[in-house]
Amino acid sequence: MSENITTQKTGQIVNIHPFAENTPQLKETTFKSIKENIKIVQADCLLALEKIESNSVDYKAKVIGGLPVGMKFDPQQGKRLQEFMSVVAEKLFRVLKPGGFFLCFSQGRLYHRMVMAIEEAGFEIRDMLIWKKVGQAKAFSQDHFVKKMKISEAEKKAILNSLANRKTPQLKSESEPIVLAQKPKEGTFINN
């Protein structure tokens, strides 16, 4: 779960995490590449974005991996993710230069929430990219459902025996959608 921001003037890359409780203390690392100095900052994204000058970032690549984890236990997580992404997208809109691009990964089942938040912040949705990956089906046993049932232990045992080695049906995820958004241009691409 990280974000990278690169500015043309300074060659700055900011690596930021979306949740403060998972974020280490602010870290800065500077190193030289062949073409430019690059500075990496690791911090809470909401705090780090506040410190970046308005209209100063040329390109923003945002990678969020695993934000929807646990959604099967909390149906409101999608709404909270959209609310969080609305705040992040508004801050990104402020720091990106006109015509700047923004990439954001999502799980398929939450892609619509991510895109709505980004679009409502003022970005133009340019396209959807697909990251083709190797995945594994996430099926799990149904034992825990049976164990929570308010029936006798004998009935639970009979049900568990009948469900032995059965798993919930799940699809194998082989792709991850990526939204390609752009802050509206001022003039032509050349002007931006």
Image (cartoon, helix red, strand yellow):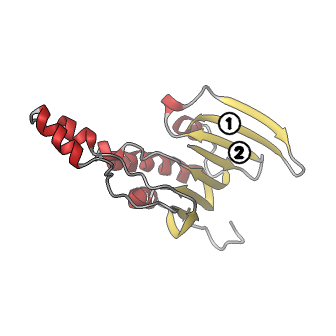
Residue 79 showing in the rendered view: yes
At label 2, counting other C-alpha atoms closer than 10 Å, the crowd grade (few under 14, some 14-19, many 20 or more) is: many
Residue 56 at what x, y percent from top left?
67, 50
Could you tell me the amino acid type at mark 1?
Answer: Val
The outermost residue toward the right is: 34
The Cα–Cα distance between marks 1 and 2, rounded to whole angstroms, is 7 Å
Q: Residue at x 50, y 67 (%)?
A: 125
Residue 16 horizontal side relative to residue 10, left or right: left
Residue 27 at what x, y percent from top left?
68, 29
Q: Residue at x 46, y 57 (%)?
A: 118
Secondary structure at badge 1 equals strand
Q: Residue at x 34, y 45 (%)?
A: 77
In the rendered structure, which disc, 1 or 2, sits on the residue that comes first in sequence? Answer: 2
Secondary structure at badge 2 equals strand
Residue 6 shows which numbered tag? none
Residue 148 at what x, y percent from top left?
19, 35
Residue 78 horizontal side relative to residue 150, left or right: right
Residue 8 at what x, y percent from top left?
75, 53
Q: Residue at x 37, y 42 (%)?
A: 70
Q: Contact, CB < 8 Å: mark 1 with mark 2?
A: yes
Could you tell me the amino acid type at mark 2?
Answer: Ile
Q: Place residue 185 in its image quadrant.
A: bottom right
Q: Which residue is mark 1?
A: 41
